[in-house]
Image: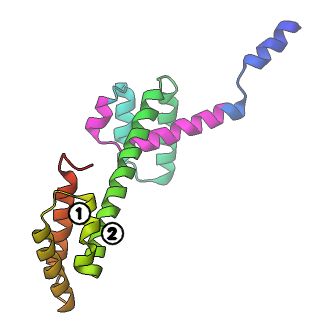
Amino acid sequence: MHETDHDDQDEISKSRRKRDLQDLKKLGQALLDFSDDALRQLMLPDVLLDALHTARKIHSNGARKRHMQYIGKLMKDIDVAPLRQAIESRNRQHDTQSREFHLLETLREQLLADGDSALPAVLAHFPHADRQHLRKLVRQARKEHDSRQPPRASRLLFRYLRELQEQPDYM
């Protein structure tokens, strides 16, 4: 009788198995956003790779849900720690890129709104920026805005700021 009590404690509850399968399905769903090359780098079994490729082609909601169940079942047999790490790394990279993009948008808007008085803030972020080129782009963009022309210079200004950000000496 004592041994059966111990065996019951080792057995995983049905609710726990369902939660684990849900987690694996969510992980599989996140893997669908990866490119084919990125999936190959994760060294996934061929069966799982094929299932992920097939899942991308399924558009019916019910069929997709069943197929995600299948992907979750396949993932029970592999170590998912590297997959979680790859997804987290990808999410961090996306967050960083979003933050940098929003910074550039903010700096451009400050330059367009405030003109030369916003230059010190931009130069604080990009000390190697060409001040004269920046001023020229800002003047052109403001002139275009005032005359209701397409925002060509504003786009050029954003592109120049992005080039500055992509330089290796940027913070």
Which x, y percent locates residue 88? 43, 40
Q: Which residue is mark 1?
A: 123
Q: Is residue 91 above or below residue 79?
A: below
Residue at image x 64%, y 35%?
18
Q: Which mark is residue 18?
A: none
Determine crowd level at label 2: few under 14, some 14-19, many 20+ residues with C-alpha closer than 10 A: few
Q: Quadrant of the N terminus?
A: top right
Residue at image x 84%, y 14%?
5
Residue at image x 35%, y 33%?
50
Q: Which mark is residue 106?
A: 2
Q: Is residue 55 above or below residue 138?
A: above
Q: Secondary structure at mark 2?
A: helix
Which x, y percent locates residue 90? 37, 42
Colouring method of the image: rainbow
Q: Nearer the viewer, mark 2 or mark 1?
A: 1
In this orientation, which residue lies closer to the viewer: 78 or 117? 117
Badge 2 or badge 1: first in the primary sequence: 2
**Span of residues in magenta:** 17-41
Label 2, label 1: how many angstroms apart (C-alpha)? 14 Å
Residue 19 visible to the viewer: yes
Residue 31 is covered by the magenta coloring: yes
Q: Quadrant of residue 138?
A: bottom left
Q: Secondary structure at mark 1?
A: helix
Q: Residue furthest right?
A: 1
- Along the horizontal axis of the image, is 5 left or right of 34? right
Which x, y percent locates residue 165? 22, 55
Secondary structure, magenta segment, majority class: helix
Q: Is residue 129 above or below residue 51?
A: below
- Along the horizontal axis of the image, is 32 left or right of 125? right
